[in-house]
Each structure stands twice: as C-alpha cells, then as structure tokens.
Amino acid sequence: MDDNAEQQPRTAAAAYPAAQLAKAFTTALTHEDADTRRRAEERGQRWRAVLAGMAAGRLTAGSRTPVAGLPAWVTLEVVRGGFATGTASAGGPLQPYETEAARQFGVPVERRALFAHCLSDAGLAWLWARLDSGRYEIGVPEEAALLTMAWLVRHGETDAALDLAAELEPFADQLRFLPRPTDVPAQASGAADAGAAVHRYTVSDSVDTLIRRRPNAAVETQREALAVWQPFGDAMLVHWLETARDGRVLELAPDTDWLARGAALLDRYRLLAAEHTRCTKHRSPRQNLGILRGALEETVAGRPLDARRLGLLRHAVDSMVRRRGLPGSAPHTALRREQARQAALPSHHALAQLMLRRLAELPQDSGIIEVPPLLTPVTEQEEHETGLPTGAEVPPVIRQVVEYALSAPIGTLVERGVVPSAEVLAELVPQLVAATTASAYGDETLRALMAANYRAFRNRRSLLLLNLDRQVRVEELPWVRAVSGQRAAVLGKPDEEGALTVLRQLGELAVQAFPGTVLPNPLVRELGVLARRCDLGVPFVEELAADIFMGTFSPKFLKSARVAAELLRGTLYERYYGIDYAAIRNLAIAETGEALSRSYGARTSPGFARLCTERAGTASGSDSWSVAANGKVIEQAQILTTHNLATLVHRVGIAPQPGWSDLARRCFGTVCRLTAQVHNNRRPLPTIKDAAYAWRQMLFALSLCPPDEQRQFLTTLDEETARHPAHVRSRLAPALAGLVRTAEGGTFDADGTADGGRAHRFLGWSTGRHWMR
C-alpha cells in the first residue's frame, strides 16, 4: 500500500489524471533514453484508461469500490494519486502457469474452468499437495483464495469452504484464484518477534543489479591505453631513437633493416587500431604518437620529411623522453611496470560476473544468511574457470550489492547500514508483521499461507478516498474472514502478547535508530496493524499531506491526543507548546459521550479540527485554503498527538536505551544537521519543517527526563552548536532562547515569541517568511 493510506484529496476531478497523462506523453516523445520513453508510454496508457473510465462512468474516483461491478476486496491496478485504472491486478490475460495448469488438468484454457476443477476431488488433491509442500507463491492476495478453500475442506469446515467458493464464483472468469506453483517452498512464517531474520533484497534482486552493471567506459579506455597504446608508443619511440645522434632523431640515415622494421610497426599499428577502438588519441596527427606514426609512414614510403614535419617529430621525441625518461631506464621501467600492474587488475565487470556465478548456487527468492563466504578473494579454482587472478579482492561496489541482501534480525540490518532510514525500515516491517499476524493460526500450513497472503496484501496500492473513508484491511478479504475462527494462542502465549512484543521492539528500534525522524506512514500503518492485534484500544495516526488536506480529522486523532495528555500533562512539552491537556481530555470525553449517544459512529472530530485551526491561527473556510495554512493546522495536530510518540511510550511501553536524555541529545544533533542545510538553500522550507519535527521529538524526550537531567541537557546545547558552522548557532539562537525561557518557567506571547522577538517557539510551517530563513 501507499504512504497516505488515510489521507483525502480535496477533489477527485479529472484534472489531475489529465495533467499526468500530458506529463507522460511529453516524456514518451522527448526523453533521450529509450527505456524511459517506453515506461512513460506505458504510464500514459494507464492514465488514458483512468480518464476513459471516469468519462464513461465505469470508474468512481474517491470510492472504496471505484470499479463498477468489483467489490472492495479486489486488488486493483492503481496509479499515482490513488486513481484506479479499472483493471484488476489478478485479472487480464491468463498467466503462463495458468495455461500450463489447464493443460495438466485437461480442462479448457479459461479461468472459470480452472476454478471449477479446483472444487473437484482431483483439484483439491492438487491444492492440498501445494499446501503440504509449500511449493507455491502468492503474487496478489487473490492467489491465496483457493488454497484457503482447500484448507477449510480438509479440516472439516465444509460450510465455510462452500460460502467462500460462492463468494468467489461470480468473479471466477475474471480473476485468477489459482496459486503460482514453484519449485521452492514458500517462505516460512518465522518467529513472531523482531529477532526474526528479514532481508531488504533477495538473491534474485542482487543478481538483477549485477546483471545491469556494464563495463565502465572510462576505466576500460584507460585500461586499453595502459595495456596497448603506451607499450606501442614506447616501441615507436625506441625505433625512432635508433636514428638519433646527440638526442636528435634522423641525424643518422635509416638503413634497409630499419625501414623494414618500421613497415612492420605500421602493420602492427593497423591491427591494433582495428582491434582496440576505445582510445582515439593515437589517431590525432597533433598527438605525439600520431606525429611519430605519420612521420614513419612518410619515411617508409621513401618521402623525405619537410622541415615542419621534421621539427614536429623531433619535438615529440624530446617531449616523450623528457616526460617519462628513455625507454629501458630505471624510472621509465618502474613507471611501465606499475601501469602494467594496474592494467592487469580485473575489471569490476569481470568480478561482477564472478559474483553472479557464486550467487547462482543460492536460493533466489530469499536473502543471504552467510555473506562472508561470498566475499572471499578469487580462488585458484575460480582462476582456472574464469581467468581472473587468484587473490583478487571483491571491490566495495560489488560487496555492497551482496551485503544489502543479508538476511538477519532487523536490528542487525540497521547496525550494518543495510537499513539507513526509517523509510527503508518501513519496507521491511511487513515481513515481521506477516509472521506475527500469521502466528495466531495453530496449523502450520495455514500459518505459512496467511503469512504469504499478508505479504502480497501489503503490495496493494492505496486508493484515493473521500469523506474520511478507510482503506481495505486484510481481515476484509473473504478468504481471511473464512479462517478468522482459526486464530488461537500459540506456544502457551496469548496472541496479543506476541504482537505487543514485536510492536514494542519495532517502536524502540525506530525511535532509537533514527532520532529526530518522523515515523513514515508505511511504518505507522504496520504499527497500527500490530496495535489492533494486541487490542491496545488506541490508534496510530498518519502524517497528513498539506496539499490534499480537507480540514477534518478522524476521531482517532483526538484519541491519540488524549493519550498524550495522560503522559505529558504538567511537563515541559505542555508548557513549551502552550497546550491545555486538561481541556483536551475533557474534549475527548465529551465527543466520546456524544458518539455513544448516536446509533452510528462518528466519522470526524470537529472539536479537534477546531482546536488545531485555532492554535494554527488560520481562518476556516475555503477562501483561506492554502498549502501553508493546511500545513500549520496539521503541524498542530502532530504537536497535540506527539505523532504517535506518546502512544509508543504510554501504551506500548517503549524505553529507548541508554535513556531519554541520550535520545534528546541525538535528536538535537539532527536539528543542528538539518539547520546547517538551510544555509544558501534556495528551497529551505522543507528542511526547516524537518528540523522542527526533530526539535519536537527532542522536546518530547527531554520532557520525560527528571528535572536535574533537563538542566544538565540545557547546559550542553551551546557546546553542541559550537561543533557546527556559525550560521547554525545564529539560526538556532531564538529557538534555544525560547527553550531555556520555558524551562525556567517562562511563557511565549500569543504570536509564539518572547523577549521582544529574541526568543521563538520553533514551528516548521508558516504562511509568511519563516524567521529561520
């Protein structure tokens, strides 16, 4: 799914798809790269499908069921912005494996026939064999449907299996419900904790990366120059020096033997020039080698050199000797020996081909458990097979490709730099969440199937939704609903306890490893899945996009703010941002009571939206709409909720090590690093916004420290800023003054300043010129 799973754009009009189509069309016509033009043409076809579907009424943008005739659970092809193209991801022409299955089953080559066969005894036996062996792959969630039905039949859940088949049957001719057979067992569901091994890339991904590597043209040109043309130039120079007296060539008349050997040199040149085409300097009549060759051609042909050409020849010879010494001299010999050694080094391309040989022996659809054996120098056996010299080292650029496929606990991947950011962390978390959600199923084959289904589901792209509607969840899939009664405690541990353990481990890892970084929406979404599994009763809230914000918040934002109120009431955080957490608690209680008095649940929290708008100092209504004004309102929501930090601490129970003071210090380091990037930045506002996010997280961590640790932390801020350029200290001075003032019991004025403007509350968004620019 996409990042903005719960965000709503202002409209679902055709203007956006039309603009994207125009952009793709321009790229397809004008881009210099053929592959880029091809991809742009494919994007253009998808956008044309969107526009055609909207015009014909087949597509309803902004709906949970945007494609007429398809239920919400169907996985759709979705393009940028959340627009459905009208095509089901599990639809389209039959896949090769479906055609082969129809041939094996002896049924017509059509999906409905395959579906009907799988309901027969023979078809069920085929599905049971796949379940038992694990030799299947789930590319889209629909491919798990028939396997689930078969599992139900085998375990006596006939009614549930019939109900599932009846729900799928209307779409049997459109969608592929048949699993993909493989020769390798499906990935095991694994242990339900963050110590389980995950991988960023598979072996197959690494292979694809290495295959795309091409010889470096500049390096290979230099290699040719050192290995071919430098030695030939020396031979040409030695030949001319045979005619020299007192260092001047052609002072001695060439004899017949000299001319014959000169003709042989010219023949050799023509062969080399035909075979080695990367270097071109030797062809230039103005280069030294070109001058020597041209003069030799004239002399061998019996044509005497005129005064100009003779002068050029002697100048070229003198220049070559002066620069590198006489051929055969000690300096010249040492130079050529070193150049020959460099030229003989194996190319990165050749070593990449060797690495492909090594990787070919591993399972391709998983990560690499043991990386070091793959990174050893070239062995004698490999020299015999490839011609590469024994002992040649694997270069760093190739080592990195292999190391990025390491399969290890996610904390290990963070330590080794394989996971360099919270965004990359979010890409890997679904592997853990899949294992955690599947661990609730007592049957091993069902566990593996549900884990594979979850991983496929997380590749589903989010739809553009209006009216605060929510994306389809995995538990809404008919085949997942059909086995929901099979969830049970595992290994004597309640299911929610295992999910809480993973949630706590992931929360601590994200906060500790990437201090001062906003939790990205994909990670928030996975944390929310785990929170529902352990029944925390509080939601995780996403970062909303200012350009598509509609001015409303769902009730979960107020619930999250209430959690923050329970944790932070009376703290430095509340004083610094001028929050009345008691009032927020009362607002949450009032809106909850109103919701209980209605027969339907609340879809929005008007009180929370009004509070954020008032705190942002922006007027409500369409006339005041702007991205910056929206950003100010959203920032206030993040301040009030702490953007999930309070939930992680107060409800999940994370406790970063070695403590909150250390985390605050590292968050401030992020603030300083980002502030340094504001200097001479032509577009500084995104960087200022990120610095304000880091500042807020620093303040949150500091507020959880005892008073003495807070005072000690404040005394170290000047020392930290002194490590950075002077412009960092000057830009942060108003923010630091405001922090110290608040810590000493002071407050800000209504405009967020104090001491006549010398102190500022640090916020990221502004509708005017930001004071940090």
Image (cartoon, grey):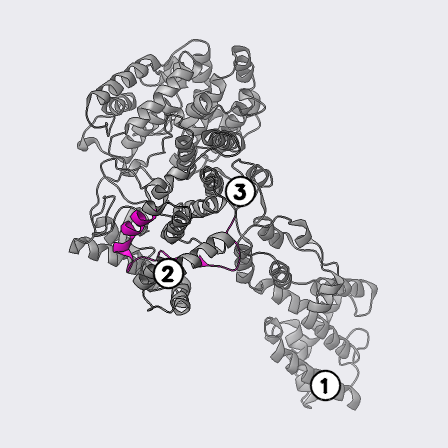
Front in this rendered view, residue 100 or 268: 100
Task: Look at 27% across and 51% down and name the residue there.
Answer: 166
Q: Quadrant of residue 211?
A: bottom right
Task: Look at 27% across and 23% down and name the residue there.
Answer: 608
Front in this rendered view, residue 256 or 569: 569
Task: Look at 71% across and 56% down and name the residue there.
Answer: 377
Q: Amino acid at mark 2?
A: Arg
**Residue receiving disc 3:** 190
Residues at marks 1 and 3 touching, judged by CB atoms closer than 8 Å: no
**Residue receiving disc 2:** 39
Earlier-in-chain disc, 2 versus 3? 2
- Position of residue 246 in the picture relative to residue 107 (left or right): right
**Residue receiving disc 1:** 264
Closest to the camera, between mark 1 and mark 2, is 2
Q: Secondary structure at mark 2?
A: helix
Whole-number angstrom distance, CA of label 1 to CA of label 2: 53 Å
Front in this rendered view, residue 372 or 611: 372
Q: Quadrant of the N terminus?
A: top left
Q: How busy is the neighbourhood of tag 2: few (under 14 within 10 Å), some, or many (20 plus)? A: some
Q: Amino acid at mark 3?
A: Gly
- Position of residue 361 in the picture relative to residue 96 (left or right): right
Q: Secondary structure at mark 3?
A: loop
288 above or below 637? below
Q: Residue 83 at x, y = what percent? A: 27, 49
Please provide the residue range marked out in magenta: 161-187
